[in-house]
Image (cartoon, rainbow, N blue to C red):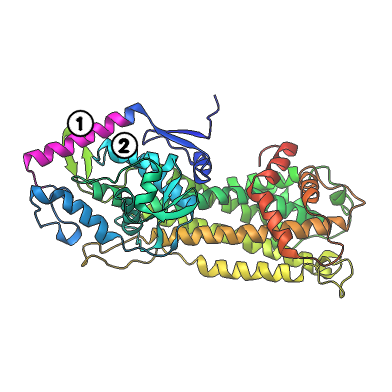
Amino acid sequence: MKKDPTKIVLDGFSLDLYSLSAVSRGQAKVQVAPAAWDRIRAGRRCVEAFVHQGKVVYGINTGFGKLASVHIPDKELNALQRNLVLSHACGVGPAIPQEIARLVVLLKINTLCTGYSGVRPEVVECLLQLLNHDVIPLLPCKGSVGASGDLAPLAHLTLVLLGMGQAWVHGRPMDGAAALASAGLQPLELQAKEGLSLLNGTQVLTAYAAMALLAGERLAKLADIAGAISVESLLNSKTAFDERIQKARGHSGQIKVAENLRRLLADSEIMDSHRQCGKVQDAYSSRCMPQVHGTVRQALAFAHELVAVELNGCSDNPLVFADQQELLSGGNFHGQPLALASDTLAIALAQLANISERRLENLMDPVQSGLPPFLAPESGTNSGFMIAQVTAAALVSENKVLSHPASVDSIPTSANQEDFVSMAAHAGRKALEVTENSETVLAIELLAGCQATDFRRDLKPGAGTGAAYRLIRERIPVMEQDRLMYQDIELMTQLMRNGRLLAAVEDAIGSL
């Protein structure tokens, strides 16, 4: 039976990547599975037993980081947790987008559902109520080095539970106390280990990586559509997409993309019209799409594996193993898996934009396309897509800077206690920005490709390219003369982002 994306049950171990979209938009109600509540209660009993026994355990009755050797008396345990939150709320910069902040709350609930953190059920219930009442903590985007997870931004999340800080309530900012009250909640008094459990973790950097990945997987398919329309309108050959060529090398992504291109271009009268033209080879940006787009898909698969695991992993420290009555300190908070995943995403998606912009440039060039300069019906009086291509060039150049890997950097913190960090939060922010830039570049290529197709309107496009062309033309008419191009770009981006363009093509030729 197909899952209802608007009803999500968290158990700590089975959160699906594709469930995140509805949550990010505030369109899903979330609940916690009964078995998860049992684990949460068991973990809490274990923590309370350690407190009662007077055992010295990091994060429960010691200081933090370099201060771990400082023993904290029982009467100060609650103050220890509160002070931890206050002292660590050092985030700066613009607020994390609400869509991502919602995922941060979701992921924090899910990791607490494992029972390894040892918080009270009341803490989880408070987070759950915030999410379901669309009370979303306002989290500054800067201040995390990706180990011990996302301390600074998660401290700002926790402030709201204490009736402090700020939150969005149905999109409107307000102070933490008022935000809690809007959801019928009272401020929490944190108890042993709870502040540390809320602050430790990779939820911010995971949310960024997940959003970039979801968008990137969609863009990989849209890039095949955009590329096929460009190949068709440039009168390029489809010989380079022959199945035998792909199998001779053997990369699975390459084989899949070439198959997609053949299906997109099937039954194209435009392609058939120049079958005997004598042109032997096309520019790399057309001819090598299987090799480039295919490798991007395999890079996305690598990132997907890491992100999918992280969604259901516990990145707290120390971890509570209730069955064995043990608390163990380790390094699960380290963001290295997500740092590498995010950097991989950024580099891969930058390549999609790079090759897209090159195809776009070929569409602008009458020598390459055989069409009017810049695809303007009356070149000179009209500039056509001249500056749209400049915008694309600006974005791909920006991507090249943003694609410098954050994961190769590290800076010691906490008096060298935290001497090797991941920079995964930085990597995630960059990856999402690269994704957004690449989406715009592909939108411009799609617009230009359809404009080029209009110059060949006496011939029928392919099965898949035709489906894309018809949907686009329902919303965005052919450019007969210069007009406000940014509006067209925005409309095209919407068609890509809301799934309508991809759905139209896949309805015609099957899944890409």
Locate the C terminus and report the quarter of the image it occupies. top right
Q: Is residue 414 within the magenta segment?
A: no
Q: Which mark is residue 114?
A: 2
* Magenta stretch bounds: 37-56
Residue 115 spot, x, y in % from top left: 28, 36
Give the residue type at disc 1. Answer: Asp
What main secondary structure does the magenta stretch of the protein show? helix
Q: Residue 249, can we see it?
A: no
Mark 2 residue crowding within 10 angstroms, few (<14) / some (14–19) / many (20+): many
Closer to the camera: disc 2 or disc 1?
2
Residue 106 spot, x, y in % from top left: 41, 43
Give the residue type at disc 2. Answer: Thr
Q: Is residue 44 within the magenta segment?
A: yes
Q: Label 1: state its secondary structure.
A: helix
Q: Residue 370, can we see it?
A: yes
Q: Residue at x 84, y 48 (%)?
A: 461
Q: Residue at x 45, y 55 (%)?
A: 173
User: Which of 91 and 136 lies nearest the eye of the viewer?
Assistant: 136
Residue 263 spot, x, y in % from top left: 74, 42
